[in-house]
Image: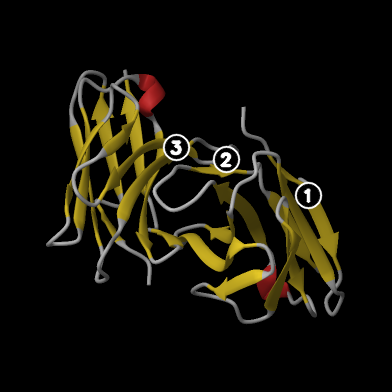
Amino acid sequence: DVKVTQSSRYLVKRTGEKVFLECVQDMDHENMFWYRQDPGLGLRLIYFSYDVKMKEKGDIPEGYSVSREKKERFSLILESASTNQTSMYLCASRYRAGTEAFFGQGTRLTVV
Amino acid sequence: QQPVQSPQAVILREGEDAVINCSSSKALYSVHWYRQKHGEAPVFLMILLKGGEQKGHEKISASFNEKKQQSSLYLTASQLSYSGTYFCGTVSYYQLTFGKGTKLSVIP
């Protein structure tokens, strides 16, 4: 079975902190994605990566950056956390375009 | 840009049918459908590819109109286990973008 693992289920950080959310997949998938999920807004794409060291902005990249140095790992970075970044963050991966995506369990981030 | 889903919410009695629609303003390579239950990760239901190929669960059916950039998910003879939020995901280039979701509640 494909496994997408996010490093934390729950995280509480202070305003202004630099925050790292990690996502690891174990199936040699080429594409990886970061979404945030808020009530009534669905899943909004922050960044995606179609290959190692490659990244593209999604619909809401402001305040975020990403890193993909190895194929299996895709990190989301909040450069200076703010309260409006309190949300559920979901990572997903897929082998390539035309194949199904698999989601991690999510990280609920609270910025205080 | 997120695809637009309709309806936003629907309540069904067991055994009833439902249709969830998804439309996009972009030319699409494929459309995905996922279901998310409360507190869980979204789970794959079906993918519809340009050219007519479909992959997914046997009990789920869907359509994809490439020219109109629209897709519909058909849920027939609904069961209590069908309850959850349904998301359509549209693929343009490598980008997989999801809608706001349709909350489906099936009651006895």
**Tag 2 subunit:** B
**Residue type of the residue flagged with mark 1:** Tyr
Q: Which residue is mark 1?
A: A10
- State yes or no: discs 2 and 1 in contact (Cβ < 8 Å): no
Structural distance between the alpha carbons of marks 3 and 2: 10 Å
Q: Which residue is mark 2?
A: B41
Q: Quadrant of the N terminus of chain A?
A: top right
Residue for point 43% across, 53% down:
A97
Direction from residue B48 to residue B34 in the image, left or right: right
Residue for point 65% across, 61% down:
A87
Query: In front of the other: label 3 or label 1?
Result: 3
Identify the element where label 3 is drawn: strand
Find residue B44 and name its label.
3
Residue for point 68% across, 80% down:
A63
Q: Position of residue B108 (x, y in %)?
A: 31, 17
Question: In the rendered image, which quarter is residue B35 located in?
Answer: top left
Direction from residue A102 to residue A25 in the image, left or right: right
Question: In the rendered image, which quarter is residue A60 located in?
Answer: bottom right
